[in-house]
Amino acid sequence: MTPPITEPDDTAILVHGLWMHGLILAPCQHWLKKEGFATRRCSYPSWSRDLEWNADTLSDFVANTPGKQIHLVCHSLGGLVALVMLGRHRDARIQRLVLMGTPVADCHCGRYLAGRKILAPFLGRSMGDWLTRTRTAVPDGIEIGVLAGTRRLGLGCVIPGLQRPNDGVVAVAETRLPEAKDHLILPVSHSGMLFSPSCARQAAHFLKTGGFVHDR
């Protein structure tokens, strides 16, 4: 007799950032699997669709994901999509959210691009929406951990005025979220977070415990 298929206890959904596809999250997915999580990658049209459309896409993806508890691990714009989704659609199974290099407070590089006619189209609709929308409070019951980087490698190296420390795209100050339960700074670049075993391990630790491992 074939044994019944059991629903996983914890499922981590990985959400990519601007100009990317879910395949970019394969390394992080691999490391989270080694930490014992069932995992899925969510892809969405980060450039061509607006923020609410992508939030609804993520909500549908969550609704069709098995798991007694669901967690989200989001890079950059993916974290903004997740926050908007949580404000619009709340799945009671969602317990914890890890934001990696997500400009929740502001985005200097994004505003620089938005303010220049030739460069503005590269920003995409979702990021443009975030820069102009009124911030909404994070729903109660969600534990949020924030990872920020300090290796200056990326677009911000050629855009004047990006506050230091930064990860080459997003300043550490721009990742600060009042509702966050924990915040950790690592010596990684914005894109480097996607390929960093230490970031994945810290994300896994937060999903398991609600906190990061801080050096003493």
Image: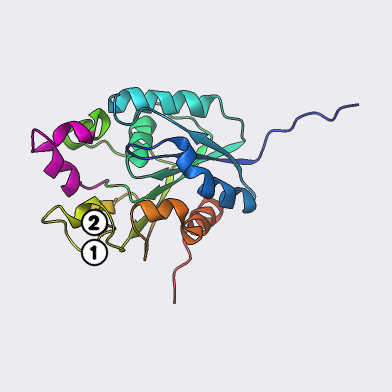
Q: CA distance from mark 1 to mark 2?
A: 6 Å
x then y, percent, for residue 36: 65, 50
x%, y% of residue 77?
A: 32, 40
Q: Which residue is drawn at the image coordinates 51% and 36% (left, top)?
A: 41
Using residue 65 as the reference point, say whether residue 83 is left or right of it.
left
State the residue position of label 2.
171
Q: Quadrant of the N terminus?
A: top right
- In the rendered structure, which disc, 1 or 2, sits on the residue that comes first in sequence? 1
Which stretch appears magenta?
104-123
Would residue 126 be seen by someone viewing this image from the given angle? Answer: yes
Task: Determine if residue 181 is in view.
Answer: no
Secondary structure type for disc 1: loop
- Label 1 sits on what residue type? Pro
Which residue is depicted at the point 41% across and 54% down?
193
Q: Decide: few, some or many residues near mark 1? Use Cα within 10 Å; few <14, some 14-19, many ≥20.
A: some
Q: Is residue 119 left or right of residue 213?
A: left
- Residue behind mark 1: 165
